[in-house]
Amino acid sequence: MKYFAVFLPMLNEEKSQEYRAQHLNFLEERRREGKIFANGRFADGAGGLVIYRAGSLEEVEQIVKQDPYVIQGARGFDIHEWEMVSDALLPY
């Protein structure tokens, strides 16, 4: 399994508020599927970050394109494979 950092830059703050509950439900479903390692918003309001676990960039892109924020034009997305370096104990 690989890790992918997905930046979700703010495109439309009004839409972001409107679709927030749907976005959070979407993330919770992916979390239950074991696809999300971590996520959170940027404190400065610039958007957010989701770290996905997946087999390929294409898999993550397919998932991200189903996010209500992306579908509704509230957020853009930028995906980067992430080679994590950590001494923390991580769940598999």
Image: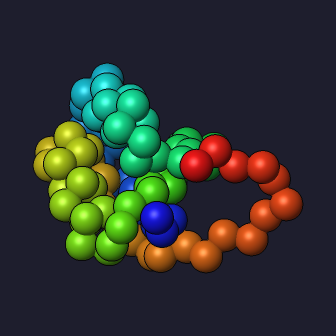
Q: Horizontally, is 31 left or right of 58 in the view?
A: right
Q: Write down the quadrant of residue 16 in the picture.
A: top left
The residue furthest right is: 87
The image shows residue 61 at horizontal and vertical percentages of 25, 65
Please name the residue shown 55% across and 73% down the image: 82
Q: Horizontally, is 5 left or right of 23 in the view?
A: right
Above-or-below relation of 22 to 8: above
Please name the residue shown 58% across and 49% down the image: 92
The image shows residue 38 at horizontal and vertical percentages of 56, 46
Above-or-below relation of 56 to 33: below
The image shows residue 46 at horizontal and vertical percentages of 50, 54
Please name the residue shown 32% across and 74% down the image: 57
Q: Horizontally, is 22 left or right of 6 in the view?
A: left
Please name the residue shown 44% across and 55% down the image: 52
Residue 42 visible to an observer of this rendering: no
In this orientation, which residue lies closer to the viewer: 33 or 68? 33
The residue furthest front is: 92
The image shows residue 53 at horizontal and vertical percentages of 45, 57
- Count numbered badges in the picture: 0
Residue 26 visible to an observer of this rendering: yes
Query: How is this picture coloured?
Result: rainbow
Q: Write down the quadrant of residue 69 in the picture.
A: top left
